[in-house]
Structure formats: structure tokens, C-alpha cells
Image: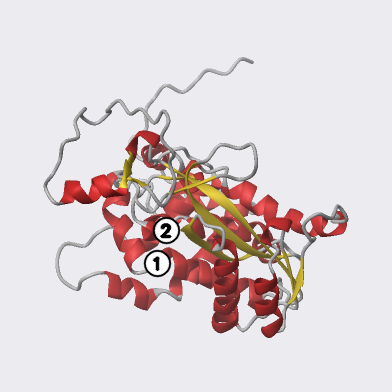
Amino acid sequence: MKGTPDRQAAVYHTFNVEDLIEAEHPLRAIKRMVDRALAEMFRTFKAAYSDRGRPGIPPETLLKALLLQCLYTTRSERELCRRHKTDLLFRWFLAMQPSAEVFDHSVFTHNRERLAEHGITRKFFKSVVKQAIEAGLTSDEHFTVDGSLIQSHASLKSLKKIEREAAKKDGDDDAGGGRNPSVDFNGERRGNATHRSTTDPEAKLYRKGDGVGAFRCHSGHALTENRHGLVMGVRVDEASGTAERENTLAMLDHLERRHGVRPSTLGADKADHSRLREMLLWTRGIEPLRPRRGSNDDTSLGRLRRVVERTIAWLHQFRRLRVRDERRADIHQAFLPRGCAVICFRTLERPYC
């Protein structure tokens, strides 16, 4: 017998959202880990907000929403808020009632500086790493480090001579052309010592290798452990020949100071080989593992580096992490721990299921 659709619109619905979520859904395990990490950040949230005034959107809700954006690769915060209105799974993850009004997308913009100023996302990532260590999912044996270039949103037309910029600040402004001037660099040699971007002054002209054009960029660095592929540290800095060495040592020192973990070996690529860095690693009791420049016998080390290269490839899936739109480094730095926490959840959710 053919059934007929029920066209009668119901005014009230009685159901439990918890019953609609599958028992084996991955978000159940992730939600337990996220709630545990957020509970440890109560003092941080209290210091970031005033005791007076109108109550705003809870920071726990904002962090959970940003995690959903990474988990489901939502392209924008507008689209994320649209999905919150229609997806009960998202509402359940955010602890929102089905009848609750969804906040506007501009809430993320208004609270972005607050999250960066108080290091909320960075502390959240540290709490996730702490859970991984307590669960026994990390080792102190073999770690790998690698760097990548984060493209700057600044255009090549924004490059100006440093002397000209200094004269412009003194009041001698003879440049015209509006917001999109016609710039001719024919016969002019550009470099970091002579030119600076007016849109993103911290961006540097850098190239990945011979035969590759230089572009405005920053450097990103990730430290992973090889057993489970968990991200243990991440940093953003100016692109330079010594950035990877300096940030590697900073991440290792922070990991030991914060979590008491010191790896026995550290793998890297050929471009990261230097005698000074090897000496600094040996003084910390860490054996450097890297193929020497000019040698081709690096197949075994290449298999170890697959973990960190896979991590960087995952992070570059998100345009917000692949391209830096913000002029302030701390705001962009606040986005990276969010993506690294999502990668850690891939491994952490298994023991919680």
C-alpha cells in the first residue's frame, strides 16, 4: 500500500537530541576530550572577560565552533553559522538547545583578538597534548621536525623601497595611483634588505629552492612524535635561513619545560643540516638524525619524515592556515593550534570510544 506524506505542520516536537546521535559517532569521543580540556581553562576564561556588562557568547562555544569548522572543512564562518541553524549534530556538540538562537558570524571577528591576546587556543592545544601524554599515546624516543612556507596575502605591488617608506612617514608623500597603483619593477632588484611590503611588513621574500620564484611568505614549523603522529609543537616566524633551527630549539625547550618530555632522537631534512644545530642538539642530549647534503642514502629517514610531512599537508588543507590574511602574527598563531588539536583528536578518539 502506498503511503502518503504527512503535510500537517507540527507546532511542538518532543525528542531528545542525545538519542539522535549515533553511539559510535566520532564526535562523542571528541566532545568528551574537548569538555575536559575546556574545564581546565576556567581561570583563563575568567581572566579574559570582565565581571560587569552584558554576557557575551561563552568562549567554550566559540572554541567548539572553530573546531567544527576544521573537522568539517567549512569554508567560512558565515557558512559555519548557517549550518548551526539546521544541523542538530552541531547544536549538540555546542551544547545549544534546538530552539536557541544562533549567534552571528561577526562574533568570531569581535573575539579573535581576545583569543589571541590571552593565548586561549594555545592553552587549549597544550591541554590536548597533556591528555595524549597521560593516555600513554606519546613516546620520548623519536621526534621529527619540519618547516613550511605560509603564503602572505600581500601583493607584490605592495613592495616599496624602505627609504621611500621612511620619507613617506616624515610627510614627503609623492606616491599616487590609489589602492591598486601601476608598479614597474623592470631593471630593479628586489630584496628583503631594500624592499618591504606595506600590507604585511613582517612578510619576507623567500623561495623554496632553485628554479622556484620568490614570494612574500612566513615560515611555519611543526614538531611531531613518530609513534602515533601526534603534533607536539607548532610555531610561526619570519621566513629566513635560520628560522627552522631557532624554532626547533624553542619548541624542544618548551616541550620539556611544559610537559617534561625530551626526545632521544630528532629527524629533519637535508636543508636543515648545520653543524651549529647538531652541536646545540647534542648539548640537550638529543641525537640528530638527518641525511647530509650531497648524499642520496636517505630512504630510511624519509620514511620517518613521512609523519611530519603528512601533518603539514593536513594543515595546508585549510586556507586559513595555508595563507596568512592577518597582519598580526599572534592572531594567525592562534589558528594553528586549533588545526593541530584536530589532528591529535584522530588518535586520541580511539581509546575514548
Q: In the structure shown, which secondary structural element does the residue marked by tag 1 occupy?
A: helix
Q: Position of residue 99 (x, y in %)?
A: 33, 46
Q: Position of residue 246 (x, y in %)?
A: 55, 69
Disc 1 crowd rating (10 Å Cα; few below 14, some 14-19, many 20+) is many
Q: Position of residue 98 (x, y in %)?
A: 38, 46
User: According to the image, label 2 marks what residue?
Assistant: 63
Left or right side of 351 for 93:
left
Left or right side of 207 for 270:
right
Sequence-first tag of 1 and 2: 2
Of 308 and 219, the residue lying toward us: 219
Of 67 and 223, the residue lying toward us: 223
Q: Position of residue 286 (x, y in %)?
A: 72, 79
Q: Alpha-carbon distance for marks 1 and 2?
A: 9 Å
Please state the total of marks drawn on the protein image: 2
Residue 242 figure quarter: bottom right
- Amino acid type assigned to the residue bearing label 2 in the image: Leu
User: According to the image, label 1 marks what residue?
Assistant: 120
Disc 2 crowd rating (10 Å Cα; few below 14, some 14-19, many 20+) is many
Residue at the spot 73% in from the left edge and 57% down from the top edge:
270
* Residue ranking furthest to the left: 171
